[in-house]
Image (spheres, grey):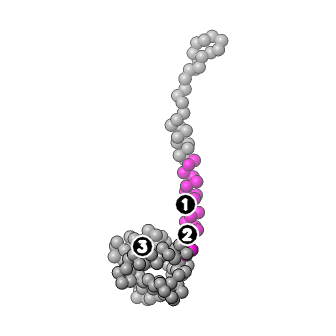
């Protein structure tokens, strides 16, 4: 269900036909050209695609859990990239971007503190202005 919502938001130009693991077929987009298709062979791949499509698409392809229509890998990737550039997005994109920002914003502080601890100058005895000998 999440994957279907993601595909509905992603496909703004053309038509993407998806065959799901249960055998159901659904078309996303305008119903016009250009066209692309893919078949998802396992429910595991379907869940992974719903969570992180950018990572899961390549992994599922390499594992044989996804097949591209007519074996046209590059055509399908072009179709998906074109729709992504057109403003289509995954429902979790905004949430994941906020999580990435939070992670990035906490890193410099931790890194800065570690550097400060490493770069502190060693304590040196100071000379007494009155007596001229070292004091600690």
Q: Quadrant of the C terminus?
A: top right
Work out whether residue 44 can be spotted: no
Specify the quadrant of the image occupied by residue 20: bottom left
Mark 3 neighbour density, 10 Å: few (under 14) some (14–19) many (20 or more) = some
- N-terminal of the pair, mark 3 or mark 2, is 3
Q: Residue furthest right?
A: 130
Give the vertical position of 17 relative to 82 (above or below): below
Identify residue for label 2: 93
Give the side of residue 130 with respect to residue 77, left or right: right
Q: Which SS does the magenta portion mostly show? A: helix
Q: Is residue 98 above or below residue 24?
A: above
Q: How many marks?
A: 3
Label 2 SS: helix
Q: Secondary structure at mark 3?
A: helix
Marks 1 and 2 sit apart, C-alpha to C-alpha, by 10 Å
Q: Position of residue 122 (x, y in %)?
A: 52, 28
The reply to whether the C-beta atoms of the residues labelled 1 and 2 are less than 8 Å apart is no
Question: Which residues are drawn in magenta?
Answer: 87-109
Give whichever of discs 1 and 3 has the lower sequence position. Answer: 3
Q: Name the residue carrying label 1.
A: 100
Dots 1 and 3: beta carbons under 8 Å?
A: no
**Would residue 107 be counted in the magenta stretch?**
yes
Give the number of the disc on residue 6.
none
Identified at 57% across, 15% down, the residue is 134
The residues tagged by marks 3 and 2 sit, at their Cα atoms, a distance apart of 16 Å
Q: At which x and y percent is residue 15?
A: 49, 85
The residue that disc 3 covers is 57
Verify whether residue 105 appears in magenta. Answer: yes
The residue lying toward the viewer, choosing from 52 and 17, is 17
Q: Earlier in the sequence, mark 1 or mark 2?
A: 2
């Amino acid at each position: 269900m999440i994957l279907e919502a993601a595909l509905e938001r992603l496909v703004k130009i053309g038509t993407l036909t998806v065959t799901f693991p249960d055998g159901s077929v659904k078309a996303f987009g305008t119903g016009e050209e250009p066209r692309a298709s893919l078949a998802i062979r396992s429910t595991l791949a379907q869940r992974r695609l719903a969570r992180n499509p950018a990572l899961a698409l390549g992994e599922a392809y390499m594992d044989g859990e996804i097949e591209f229509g007519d074996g046209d890998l590059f055509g399908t990737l072009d179709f998906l990239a074109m729709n992504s550039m057109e403003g289509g997005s995954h429902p979790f994109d905004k949430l994941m971007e906020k999580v990435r920002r939070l992670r990035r914003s906490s890193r410099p502080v931790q890194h800065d503190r570690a550097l400060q601890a490493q770069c502190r100058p060693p304590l040196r005895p100071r000379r007494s202005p009155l007596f001229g000998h070292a004091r600690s």
